[in-house]
Image (tube, grey):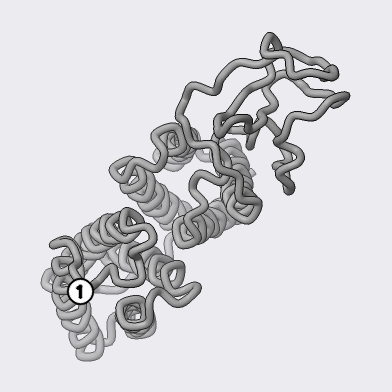
Amino acid sequence: MQKYFYTSAKITLILVYVVILAGAMVRMTGSGMGCPDWPKCFGYYIPPSDIKELTWSPGREFKEGQVIIRNEALWVASDDFTTGAQYDPAHWRPYTKHDYAIFNPTHTWIEYVNRLSGALAGLATLLMAIFSLAYARKNKTITILSWLTVILMGFQGWLGATVVYSVLNPMKITLHMLVALIIVAIVLYILNRAKLPDRRLASGTFRTLLIAAIALSLIQILLGTQVRQFVDEQGAAAASVFDNPALVFYFHRSFSIVVFAVNFALFFRSRKSGIETNNISWMMALIVIEILSGVAMYYFDFPFGMQALHLMAAAILFGLQFWLLLRTKLVEKSL
């Protein structure tokens, strides 16, 4: 099973990033409540595309758990039945997790794709963990971390449900993103442990800068989720959201200077020493994308796709930085 493990781990990593992208699209389009229940969507495995599917009508068959919108509230079928000529409240119970009862088919399908990508990532993670059993004797760390990743994916799914039930509580959204990055880091560590890449000698200063860069990227991503929350809270006033922005926006913008400075110091030392010059050049390119997409959102009223690009560049940057840390850390351990 070892020959399948490394491939399954790489697929898992790719799918985790797909989930991050899907989540960014959900946030960008305001589709977080596109499916007001979990894990189904309005009580269906395949979500509705038309409001008629969520409207009571006579002579229609309903299955237990399916949802309708009636009087601006969600109602859940309490059993399997076919409607009569008149609405019978005995067959319905109110949905009690929250009182959000708005249907937008575009939002619904964006959120559904997000959940579907999460399910695929979860399946890939499970396969990776099963294949990791081949390492149970000679490299238990791989097996333990693989199954820990399965647990974290399950936790991430549960956390996604609590985000919906809380009607997009900002702290839970931030935690949701943090767990995704932790999963990325663990899978990268597993990949590194399973198939050691060529190791490069790096100075203590280089590694210290790299650790600082990782920490700064993580903080900056979490600050970014708070900035987006501020934007979401403005609602219809979003067009002028930065006329009087919250303090977190100024901190996020100013902090980007620190992020750039630390990564540029890494770039300079890399050019001087010849350590991982290609990967660190990619890091700088990602930071430039971060800056340009941030500027575009500020000055051009959030052009379509900019937020998703902004978040994906940050998530990939974090992963690349962590991967480089693993490579240089291995060298120092061998000395």
Quadrant of the snapshot with the N terminus: top right
Q: Quadrant of residue 92?
A: top right
Asked if residue 21 can be seen in this view, the reply is yes
Residue drawn at point x = 47 percent, y = 31 percent: 99
233 vs 207, left or right, is right
Look at mark 1 in the image and give the residue it sits on.
Answer: 256
103 vs 52, left or right, is left
Image position of 44 with respect to 317: above or below: above
Quadrant of the snapshot with the C terminus: bottom left
Residue drawn at point x = 44 percent, y = 32 percent: 165
Q: Residue furthest bottom?
A: 272
Q: Residue furthest right?
A: 59
For the residue pair 285 and 249, the one nearer the viewer reads as 249
For the residue pair 13 and 28, the one nearer the viewer reads as 28
Q: Amino acid at mark 1?
A: Ser
Q: Residue 292: percent from the left, percent from the top?
A: 34, 83
